[in-house]
Image (spheres, rainbow, N blue to C red):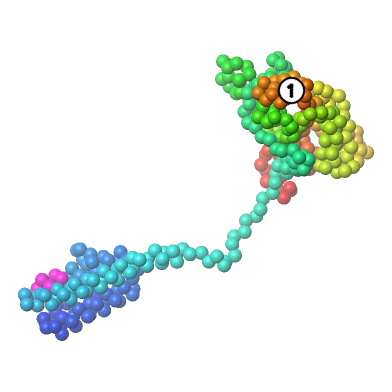
Amino acid sequence: MQNDEIPPLSGWSEAELDQAFAAVALEVEDSAAALRSPEQFRLQWLGRKQGRLKAISDSWLKSAPADARKAIGQRFNTLKAEIERRLELADSASPHDALDAEAVDITLPGTQRKLGAEHPLIRTWNEIVSVFQRMGYSVGAGPEVETDYYNFESLNFPPGHPARDTQDTLVIAGQERKPLRDRLLMRTHTSPVQIRTMEQQPPPVRIVIPGKVHRNDAADATHYPIFHQVEGLCVDANITFGDLKGTLDFAMKAFFGSSVRTRFFPSFFPFTEPSADVQISCPFCGGSGCRKCKQSGWIELLGCGMVDPAVFGLVQGKQPGYDPKKVSGFAFGMGIDRIAMMKYGIGDIGLLYSGDLRFLEQFV
């Protein structure tokens, strides 16, 4: 019985009813074997308007004589129970079937993705920081949007100092009504992190601070409005300029090679006294003179100095341990971009920020 039409019963005897319902049960079994979805099976057999059980009820049960309806009804209920059982089995099995269809063979080789490479700036950053970490320095970080107090005042830059000029500093708009020390700007160096660290931590302090800084510079081959610095601070009892020289000499040898020499020249920075510029013997020509050192044999690399007691005096209000009569310290700073350009022979700082894969792929 494979068509949609329900044939009439040949008779109402027990044998004839058994034969008719056995044929329907066989059809149910065939439908279940060819099952595509539980919903399709349910509609085919239990649908209210066109289901085959309804058609059987209309054709056999309603037209049967009164004395045969009980026997037909019993067989009808048994058939319906069997259909519902098969539908319940199909419903419970279908989620597993769906999962099986979506299963992934984990024994197959996976898709290999090419590993990236460190940007030359980040590589240089990490190499410099690792040198000082091996010397016992911790790594500090701070906000890029700073207040005038932390960027200038706390570092002994008095009002009217040229560094405060908007020709050099990128200031945040709409700050005119605030007190000068509370006005926001893009930090021009990572030195504010030195002050924040001292305010939060009593001496001794040994910290190195890499980070992004911003200045109102016109872009050219060696200048860019965004660049990176790494600064260091060491504060403890009896720290001397000799400690500063020994630290930087060791760091330069660790970074550029043991044959590199250092020399110091007097300089000026508002937050250190005395201050010095540091040169290293050219690591590319060994000091004999080349294009990178402009034939001088030396390359000016960083600035440094002993922390000005006035800076300790400002910090002392929040952290009493920084009494300038009891502690001393030194600070230094260098440009990561410049060192990366020098190390990798990059002639234009803009290339470091261009995102040009043709440039970056040479560092893979």
> Is residue 62 on the magenta stretch?
yes
> Is residue 336 on the magenta stretch?
no
Figure quadrant of residue 8: bottom left
250 in relation to 117, above or below: above
Q: Is residue 60 visible?
A: no
How many neighbours does mark 1 have within 10 angstroms: few (below 14), some (14-19), or many (20 or more)?
Answer: some
Number of numbered discs:
1
Residue positioned 33% across, 65% down in the render: 91
Residue positioned 29% across, 76% down in the render: 29
95 in relation to 184, above or below: below
> Between residues 196 and 144, which one lies in front from this camera angle?
196
Figure quadrant of residue 190: top right
Tell me residue 201's x, y (percent). Answer: 68, 31
The amino acid on which the numbered mark 1 sits, given as a three-letter code, is: Asp
Residue positioned 84% across, 32% down in the render: 243
Highlighted range, magenta: 57-63
Name of the residue lying farthest toward the right: 288
210 in relation to 180, above or below: below
Tell me residue 352's x, y (percent). Answer: 71, 39
Name of the residue lying farthest toward the bottom: 15
Tell me residue 163's x, y (percent). Answer: 72, 20
Q: SS at mark 1?
A: loop
> Between residues 358 and 17, which one lies in front from this camera angle?
17
Left or right of 184 in this view: 327: right
Which part of the image, by quadrant, shows the N terminus? bottom left
> Between residues 238 and 186, which one lies in front from this camera angle?
238
Secondary structure, magenta segment, majority class: helix
Figure quadrant of residue 182: top right
Residue matched to label 1: 323
Tell me residue 325's x, y (percent). Answer: 78, 21
